[in-house]
Image (cartoon, rainbow, N blue to C red):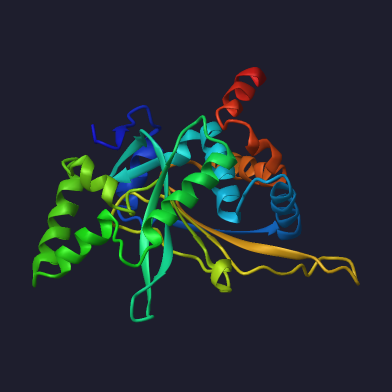
């Protein structure tokens, strides 16, 4: 038993063997790329703005992702020390840019927890309030303060991270440290379009429990658009730990994810409504 999850024991022999065949997260990384309809997403965001409601690319993506996870919970599993765990919450991490007093850019990592009762609007507000709280150049969040202390003492960083890794592998890492760490997360997401940068395939970190990393890149013209039609698409890359779910389970998850993004109005309802839909189908 860990502070952030419970070990899964009712696994097939193949699934139990995978963490031994591929003991490191970078051994088990698979890459996928998809293109989102940027025009449709922008039209939805603008329509909500006219209604006086704010929605962003990130809040849409994270909402669609979490709603798909509720229907496909294995995507929220993680591997630690060759064992597979079911996470007992859902959170996502992301990085924001800040500007130091001397004008140089700086980054800080943030983590937001979601609940099954959330909607795309509450997710947007959670992201906004978290960013606002940490945007002030005079303010450092708990993660920043901890890192500043650790790296301020010669040799301490190596000892601290070595000890943290050892404790994590043996399920002894305190909950307070897990909550500080952006690397202990259901999903790490980056919106490179916000800094006008092309999409990249970002690795999942070996430290921590990140099983999926999603990147949104700078929108590009749709090469399949009819002649004379100007249409944009947004590249989206996904790097995932293949040990947490089978290929068919990932396939069903992605089908649900893109269905949610294609019909963003569904994200205005509490996300756990998808569970009622799932039960009705059965």
Q: In this view, does 262 lie to the left or right of 139?
A: right
Quadrant location of the N terminus?
A: top left
Rendering coords of residue 77 (x, y %): 40, 39
Q: Can residue 58 be seen in this view?
A: yes
Residue 253 visible in image: no
The residue shown at (22%, 40%) is: 175
Camera-nearest residue between 101 and 243:
101
Q: In this view, does 112 lie to the left or right of 45?
A: left
Q: In this view, does 5 lie above or below 81?
A: above
Q: Quadrant of residue 199?
A: bottom right
Name the side, left or right, on which 174 lies relative to 16: left
Q: Quadrant of residue 223?
A: bottom right
Please, is residue 131 above or below residue 67 in the view?
below
Q: Residue at x 16, y 41 (%)?
A: 172
| Image coordinates for residue 215, horizontal then vertical, percent | 53, 61
Identity of the residue drawn at 48% across and 50% down: 127
Query: Residue 110: horizontal and vertical position, in percent?
Result: 38, 55
């Amino acid at each position: 038993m860990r502070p952030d999850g419970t070990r899964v024991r009712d696994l097939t022999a193949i699934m139990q063997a995978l963490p031994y065949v591929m003991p490191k997260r970078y051994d088990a990384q698979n890459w996928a790329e998809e293109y989102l309809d940027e025009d449709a997403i922008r039209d939805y965001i603008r329509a909500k703005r006219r209604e006086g409601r704010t929605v962003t690319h990130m809040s849409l993506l994270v909402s669609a992702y979490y709603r798909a996870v509720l229907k496909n919970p294995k995507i929220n599993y993680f591997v630690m020390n060759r064992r597979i765990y079911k996470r007992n919450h859902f959170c996502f991490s992301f990085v924001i840019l800040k500007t130091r007093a001397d004008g140089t850019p700086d980054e800080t990592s943030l983590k937001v927890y979601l609940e099954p009762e959330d909607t795309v609007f509450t997710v947007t507000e959670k992201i906004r309030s978290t960013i606002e709280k940490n945007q002030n150049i005079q303010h450092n969040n708990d993660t920043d303060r901890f890192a500043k202390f650790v790296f301020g003492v010669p040799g301490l960083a190596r000892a601290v991270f070595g000890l943290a890794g050892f404790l994590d592998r043996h399920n002894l890492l305190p909950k307070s440290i897990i909550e500080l760490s952006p690397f202990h997360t259901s999903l790490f997401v980056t919106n490179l379009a916000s800094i006008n940068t092309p999409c990249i395939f970002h690795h999942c970190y070996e430290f921590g429990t990140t099983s999926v990393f999603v990147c949104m890149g700078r929108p590009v013209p749709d090469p399949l658009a009819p002649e004379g039609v100007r249409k944009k698409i947004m590249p989206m890359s996904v790097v995932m730990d293949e040990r947490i779910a089978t290929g068919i389970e990932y396939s069903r998850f992605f089908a649900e994810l893109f269905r949610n993004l294609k019909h963003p109005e569904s994200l205005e309802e509490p996300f756990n409504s998808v569970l009622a839909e799932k039960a009705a189908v059965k």
